[in-house]
Image (spheres, rainbow, N blue to C red):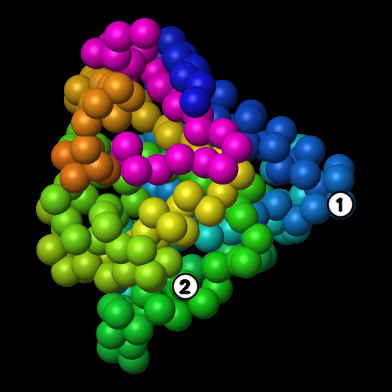
Amino acid sequence: MSIDILPDADALAQTIAERLTTLVAGLQAQERTPRIVLTGGTIAAAAYEKIDAEAADWSDVDFWFGDERFVPEDHADRNDQQARDAFLDRVGATRVNSVSGNDCSLSAAEAADQYAGTLPDEPFDVVLLGMGPDGHVASLFPHHDQLHEEDRDCVELFDSPKPPPVRISMTFPALNHSESVWFLVSGAEKADAVARALANEGSVDETPARGARGLQETRWLLDEDAASAHEA
């Protein structure tokens, strides 16, 4: 596990954008199509806006989302819509795997199972994860049964503590099937959760972020405010 601390949110967003672009370009130089799981959230959106459209072939990247709000397609609350607005459309991304919208054609459970069917057999190259002040990642919240799901790669939940209440989320078996997991965390309001996540002892039930890890790399990208309660 590695921890990188940047001076502020803007520097953090720039670093995320540059490292993601470098990763993509490097994999493409090996004639690989990168497999990337995106996250929502303020710092992720800020990073996406800084991505250089010309530095990699973004049309040759397979994208997924770690979780999604089960609302109609094109809804402003959806992670995929926010990512499209911030960079996917701008850079010409075409290989974007999105959760079905809530148009009454599928139940949340059916949408979760359908999305699981889009996931690759090979590991992702990187999973990007934000983290809430309560320590949640994707839509895996403290003291929820979904934290302990082992058989399904994607699940539905109906009681998200944050609105909207109905969500689709990858589970830990899916999120952790990745060469790298990068946590992207900014803000003093998340400092206590960061400290719990990085502590030697603690539970996934209390701090879900403790359950996410990469096969080869787990990297925390923090600004100084988010890192302020962590004892190095």
Mark 1 vs mark 2, CA separation in Å: 26 Å
Residue situated in front as seen by the camera: 45 or 194: 194
Element under disc 2: helix
Write the residue at 28% across / 78% down.
Answer: 108
Q: Amino acid at mark 1?
A: Glu
As drawn, 187 above or below 62: above
Q: Is residue 85 magenta?
A: no
Q: Nearer the viewer, residue 46 or 225?
A: 225
Q: Residue 99, relative to residue 24: is it above or below?
A: below
Give percent across and percent down for residue 148: 27, 57
Element carrying mark 1: loop
Residue 41 in view of the camera: no
Residue 8, image x, y percentages: 40, 15
- Mark 1 vs mark 2: which is more N-terminal? 1
In this picture, residue 160 sits left or right of residue 63: left
Please tell me which residue is depicted at 39% across the width and 54% down the height of the picture: 172
| Location of residue 190 by image quarter | top left
Q: Which residue is mark 1?
A: 31
- Eyeballing the image, is 84 above or below 226? below
Residue 134 appears in the picture as rendered = yes
The magenta segment? 209-232
Disc sitting over residue 116 in the figure: 2
The mark found on residue 156 in the picture is: none
Neighbours of disc 1 within 10 Å: few (<14), some (14-19), many (20+): few
Compared across the picture, whether 36 is left or right of 31 comes to left
Residue at figure coordinates x 17%, y 39% from the top left: 206
